[in-house]
Image (spheres, grey):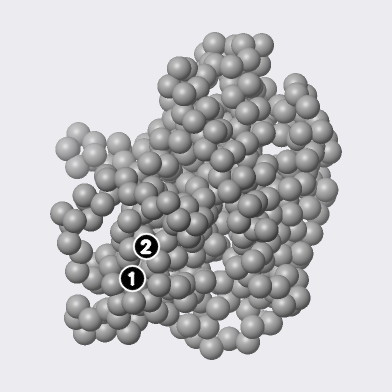
C-alpha cells in the first residue's frame, strides 16, 4: 500500500471519529458568541487573548465529563439527573436554559438575516421566515445520519475567521506573547467582558446536546441494546475524548482568531464599540488595506462565518431544548425518530424556533436579550456542573469510568469560576 493511500485511510478514520464533539465545539461559536469575542477585541485589543487558552482545559473537562456520562449510561444527561438526583433542580435548570435558548435563537436568526443583507438585499420578514423554515425542515425531515453529516460539514464555515487573518498584517511574536501572558485590569468593563466570554464559552445547553448526540451515535451503531457494549466501551470513550478535544480546540482557535482580527483592525483604528457580529463584519471592510479588495474579502469571510455558524448553532440550540424537555417529561426523543413517533420532541423544536423567530418582530433589543440569556445560562450552569461532578464520581452509575483526579480538579475550578461569573453578571444586570 502506498504511503499516500495509508495517509488517506488514516484521515478517513479520523474524520469518521469526529462527530458530536466537533459539532458541539463549533456550535459554541454562534453569532452571539462571535459578537462577544468581537467586542472583546474591539474594546480591549489583545489584552484578553489569553482567555482563549485559559478556558480550553475547562471546556474539555466539562464536555468530556458530560459526554462520558451519556456514553456509559446510554442516556441523555437530563434523564440521568431525573432518575438519580433532584428533579426540582433539573426542571429549574432546564426551564431557565430553554428561555435563554429562545433569546439566543431569536438573536442568531436576526444576525443571519442582517448578514445576508450585507451581501444581498433581502426583505427582513422574508429572510426571518425563510431561515426559520429551512432549519425546522432539516431537523424534522432529514434522516439523522444525513443530518449529522450536514452539521459536521457546517463546521468548516468557522474557518472563515482564521482565513481572515490572511487579510491583515499580524505581528506574530507580539500576538503569541499576549496569548500566553495573562493581563488583568480591576475595572468593571474589563471584568464584565471576561464574564461574558466565560458565560458564552462554557454554555450549559452544550452539556446536554453533546451527551444526547453521543446516544444518537450509539443508536445508529446499534450499541444501545448491544450485549457486547461493555467490551467496546473503552474504545468508544477513547473516540469520544479525541472528538471532544478536537471540537473544543477548534472552538477556542476560532475564538482566538476573532479576537486577533478585531483587535488588530478595529481596536487599532479606534473602533471600540461593537454591538453585533454583523457590525464587526461591516466595520472590517474600510479598515483592511493589505491588497486590492482585501477589505471586501475580509468582510465577506466574516459574514460567511456568521451565516455558517448560525446554520450550525441554531439547530443545536433548538435541539437541546427539545431533548431536555423530552427527557424531563419522559417523552420519546431523538432526531432518529420518525415525525409521528417523536411528535412531542419535534413539536418542542417547532415551538422553540417559532418563539425565537417571533422575538425579531417584538422590537426587543438583541443585545439586552443576549445579556439576559447569558445571565439565565449562568444561573443554570453551577448546579448542573455540580451534578455532573456528583454523577461522574458515582460508581453505581459510572462503574469503572468515574472521574479521574485531573477531571475533578478542572471540574471544581470551573464550578467555582462559573459561580463567581454568575454573581458578577447578576450584579452587572441590575
Q: Where is residue 289 in the image (x, y as percent from the top left)?
A: 23, 81
Q: Residue at label 1?
A: 267
The quadrant of the rendering that contains the N terminus is top left
Q: Is residue 185 left or right of residue 84?
A: left
In the depicted structure, whether residue 407 falls above or below residue 46: above
Q: As rendered, which of 178 and 188 lies closer to the eye?
A: 188
Q: Estimate how packed mark 1 is, as few (under 14), some (14 to 19) or many (20 or more) residues with alpha carbons within 10 Å.
A: many
- On screen, residue 4 versus residue 105, left or right, reads left
In the figure, residue 57 lies in which quadrant? top left
Could you tell me which quadrant the C terminus lies in? bottom right
Label 1: state its secondary structure. helix
Residue 44: which disc?
A: 2
Q: Where is residue 414 in the image (x, y as percent from the top left)?
A: 51, 34
- Residue 101 lies left or right of residue 228; in this view the side is right
Residue 310 visible? The answer is yes
Residue drawn at 73 percent across, 70 percent down: 359
- The tag earlier along the polypeptide, 1 or 2, is 2
Amino acid at each position: 500500500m502506498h504511503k499516500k493511500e495509508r495517509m488517506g485511510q488514516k484521515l478517513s478514520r479520523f474524520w469518521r471519529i469526529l462527530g458530536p464533539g466537533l459539532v458541539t465545539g463549533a456550535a459554541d461559536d454562534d453569532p452571539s458568541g462571535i459578537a462577544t469575542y468581537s467586542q472583546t477585541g474591539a474594546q480591549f485589543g489583545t489584552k484578553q487573548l489569553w482567555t482563549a487558552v485559559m478556558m480550553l482545559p475547562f471546556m474539555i473537562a466539562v464536555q468530556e465529563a458530560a459526554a462520558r456520562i451519556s456514553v456509559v449510561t446510554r442516556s441523555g444527561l437530563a434523564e440521568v439527573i431525573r432518575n438519580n438526583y433532584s428533579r426540582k433542580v433539573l426542571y429549574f435548570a432546564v426551564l431557565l436554559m430553554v428561555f435563554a435558548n429562545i433569546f439566543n435563537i431569536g438573536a442568531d436568526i436576526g444576525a443571519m438575516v442582517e448578514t445576508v443583507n450585507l451581501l444581498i438585499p433581502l426583505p427582513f420578514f422574508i429572510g426571518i421566515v425563510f431561515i426559520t423554515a429551512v432549519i425546522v425542515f432539516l431537523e424534522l425531515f432529514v434522516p439523522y445520519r444525513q443530518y449529522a453529516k450536514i452539521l459536521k460539514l457546517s463546521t468548516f464555515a468557522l474557518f472563515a475567521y482564521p482565513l481572515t487573518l490572511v487579510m491583515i498584517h499580524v505581528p506574530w511574536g507580539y500576538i503569541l506573547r499576549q496569548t500566553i501572558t495573562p493581563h488583568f485590569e480591576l475595572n468593571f468593563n474589563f471584568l464584565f467582558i471576561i464574564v461574558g466570554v466565560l458565560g458564552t464559552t462554557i454554555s450549559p445547553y452544550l452539556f446536554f446536546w453533546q451527551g444526547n448526540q453521543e446516544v444518537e451515535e450509539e443508536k445508529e451503531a446499534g450499541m444501545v441494546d448491544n450485549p457486547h457494549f461493555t467490551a467496546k466501551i473503552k474504545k468508544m470513550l477513547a473516540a469520544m475524548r479525541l472528538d471532544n478535544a478536537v471540537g473544543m480546540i477548534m472552538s477556542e482557535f476560532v475564538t482566538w482568531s476573532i479576537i486577533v482580527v478585531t483587535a488588530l483592525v478595529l481596536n487599532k483604528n479606534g473602533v471600540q464599540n461593537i454591538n453585533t457580529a454583523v457590525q464587526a463584519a461591516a466595520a472590517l471592510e474600510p479598515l483592511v488595506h493589505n491588497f486590492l479588495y482585501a477589505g471586501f474579502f475580509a468582510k465577506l469571510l466574516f459574514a460567511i462565518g456568521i451565516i455558517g455558524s448560525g446554520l450550525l448553532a441554531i439547530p443545536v440550540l433548538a435541539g437541546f431544548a427539545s431533548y431536555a424537555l423530552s427527557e424531563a417529561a419522559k417523552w420519546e426523543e431523538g432526531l432518529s425518530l420518525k415525525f409521528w413517533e417523536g411528535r412531542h420532541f419535534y413539536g418542542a423544536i417547532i415551538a422553540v424556533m417559532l418563539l425565537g423567530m417571533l422575538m425579531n418582530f417584538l422590537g426587543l433589543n438583541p443585545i439586552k436579550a443576549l445579556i439576559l440569556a447569558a445571565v439565565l445560562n449562568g444561573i443554570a450552569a453551577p448546579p448542573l456542573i455540580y451534578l455532573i461532578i456528583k454523577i461522574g464520581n458515582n460508581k453505581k452509575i459510572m462503574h469503572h469510568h468515574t472521574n479521574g483526579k485531573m477531571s475533578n480538579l478542572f471540574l471544581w475550578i470551573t464550578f467555582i469560576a462559573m459561580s463567581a461569573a454568575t454573581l458578577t453578571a447578576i450584579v452587572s444586570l441590575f
